[in-house]
Image (tube, rainbow, N blue to C red):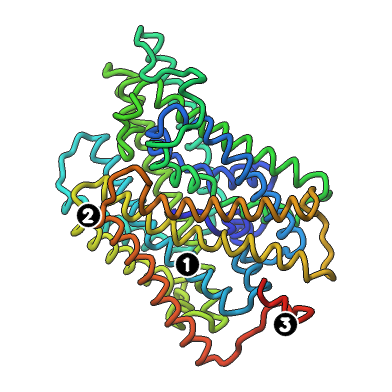
């Protein structure tokens, strides 16, 4: 997944050697933020997922877009959250963020491979046990890693391809629902205000998947620095981004819920099941399902490849600055790809797959355990960045800000605190939802995975900084009292 945390659009521009067009930026945002593979978990929330998407979009996603828009316009350097947090809190915190991005993505790749392997097996009706699927996961990880080691001259094309397939998938899901109704079936779920309105309960289990689906809004910063009129264009671009992502999610989720009852949605295989039921088992319908399924698999692989490259490039740059282990700084001798970070990441993914397989009873449990660990790691940088945003806004008064969050300071602060509360509750719900059975094994796996990842990272970061002996301070503050910020 995750993940969803670096400047894919920015990195693509650097690799392709030309400026991104407006279409490239829009498609890059779709690739970064609209994850079609999380549509099924969101649909499992039920029809109330629609209202939850709108609420989270308004109180979390849109303010988050405006925050990174201000940061991206004021500090248009590469690195996104890593660069902004490092500017506010110094090298140590910057290195921590880079570690969480890279290591979190390496863990997320394992859950992404779980989805790909299970979709492949479902599409071609292949029966494989959990151990066999784990073996295929590992083979696929190393195959994509080998591809990532090659020169990536067409990264923008791959991003645009993946984004186009995601849009096609969303439209295809709602089309499946319409065909399902046209063939005389009743909607599998009731679409009424009583059902759509947000409710607490079973939906809370899947709220983290919804929050996760809205992460990645820092990719807006890739566009912010290049806009001619940031004060006017950024709010429009941010609002357009929110409407686009929420709209695609609502369209896709609605398509699934027209065909499959929410309590019957398979969080891994729900998409293919929806297409099969919608288009039917005739020759044409089967052919359409196979074509869409293959495009879906290609998009998932492309998405994994691009996130793998983006996070590994960040880890490589951080290691070259002597903030992460030197092994991550190594480049491929011929292709200049981040070989050290890619290979180390593949090793972590392999270990995660083996451990999660040993502790899980099903592919769905394996996916959810890895997803939960990864998501918690990827929530932390956003939590810290909201704090860094407030600090830089308060103390860095000399930097010109082409765009400023359009609200009074007290409103901005209140929105940041609300966003941090949402992130904290999301992490909490990943471990346990009050009112639901507490699964000690899953909670232990998640907690140990997160703490172990952070602990190992802290060890390597401090050792790297000690060896380099080049720590940089955070933004100077007017008085010692303000260091509490």
Would residue 168 be seen by someone viewing this image from the given angle?
Answer: no
Q: Are marks 1 and 2 in contact (CB under 8 Å)?
A: no
The circle on residue 480 is: 3
Q: Choose the circle earlier in sequence order: 1 or 2.
A: 1
The one nearer the camera, 162 or 48, is: 48
**Place of residue 61 in the rendered image (x, y in percent of width and height, measured from the top left):** 61, 45
Q: Residue at x 40, y 27 (%)?
A: 256
Task: State the residue position of label 1.
Answer: 100
Q: In what element is the residue under mark 1?
A: helix
Q: In what element is the residue under mark 3?
A: helix
Q: CA distance from mark 1 to mark 2?
A: 24 Å
Image-based side of 216 in relation to 201, left or right? right
**Place of residue 455 in the rendered image (x, y in percent of width and height, measured from the top left):** 40, 76
The one nearer the camera, 436 or 246, is: 436
Q: Quadrant of residue 413?
A: bottom right
Task: State the residue position of label 2.
Answer: 134
Q: Residue at x 29, y 29 (%)?
A: 264
What crowding class fits label 2: few (fewer than 14 Cα within 10 Å), some (14-19), or many (20 or more)?
A: many
């Amino acid at each position: 997944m995750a993940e969803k945390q670096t400047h894919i659009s920015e990195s693509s521009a650097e690799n392709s050697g030309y400026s991104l067009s407006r279409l490239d930026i829009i498609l890059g945002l779709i690739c970064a933020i609209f994850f079609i593979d999380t549509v099924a978990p969101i649909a499992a929330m039920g029809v109330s997922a629609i209202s939850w998407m709108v609420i989270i979009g308004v109180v979390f996603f849109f303010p988050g877009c405006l925050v990174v828009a201000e940061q991206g316009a004021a500090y248009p350097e590469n690195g996104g959250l890593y660069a902004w947090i490092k500017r506010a809190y110094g090298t140590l915190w910057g290195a921590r963020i880079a570690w969480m991005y890279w290591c979190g993505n390496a863990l997320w790749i394992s859950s992404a491979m779980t989805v790909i392997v299970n979709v492949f097996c479902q599409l071609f009706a292949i029966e494989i046990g959990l151990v066999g699927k784990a073996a295929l996961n590992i083979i696929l990880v190393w195959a994509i890693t080998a591809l990532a080691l090659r020169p990536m001259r067409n990264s923008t094309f791959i991003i645009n391809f993946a984004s186009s397939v995601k849009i096609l998938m969303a439209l295809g899901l709602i089309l499946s629902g319409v065909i399902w109704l046209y063939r005389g079936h009743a909607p599998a779920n009731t679409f009424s205000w009583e059902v759509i309105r947000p409710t607490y309960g079973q939906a809370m289990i899947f709220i983290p998947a919804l929050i996760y689906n809205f992460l990645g809004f820092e990719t807006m910063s890739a566009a912010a620095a290049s806009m001619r009129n940031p004060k006017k264009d950024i709010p429009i671009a941010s609002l357009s981004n929110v409407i686009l992502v929420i709209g695609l999610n609502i369209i896709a989720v609605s398509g699934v819920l027209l065909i499959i009852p929410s309590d019957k949605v398979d969080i891994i295989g729900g998409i293919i099941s929806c297409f099969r039921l919608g288009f039917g088992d005739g020759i044409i319908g089967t052919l359409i399902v196979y074509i869409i399924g293959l495009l879906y698999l290609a998009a998932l692989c492309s998405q994994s490849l691009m996130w793998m490259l983006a996070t590994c490039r960040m880890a490589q740059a951080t290691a070259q600055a002597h903030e992460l282990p030197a092994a991550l700084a190594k480049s491929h001798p011929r292709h200049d790809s981040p070989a050290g970070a890619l290979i180390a990441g593949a090793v972590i993914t392999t270990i995660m797959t083996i451990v999660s397989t040993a502790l899980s009873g099903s592919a769905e449990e394996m996916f959810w355990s890895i997803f939960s660990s990864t998501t918690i790691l990827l929530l932390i940088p956003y939590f810290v960045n909201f704090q860094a945003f407030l600090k830089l806004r308060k103390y860095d008064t000399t930097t010109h800000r082409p765009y400023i969050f359009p609200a009074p300071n007290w409103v901005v602060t209140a929105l940041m605190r609300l966003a941090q509360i949402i992130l904290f509750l999301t992490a909490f719900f990943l471990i346990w939802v009050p009112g639901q059975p507490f699964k000690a094994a899953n909670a232990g796996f998640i907690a140990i995975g997160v703490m172990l990842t952070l602990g190992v990272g802290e060890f390597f970061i401090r050792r790297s900084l000690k060896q380099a002996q080049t720590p940089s301070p955070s933004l100077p503050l007017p008085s010692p009292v303000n260091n509490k910020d």
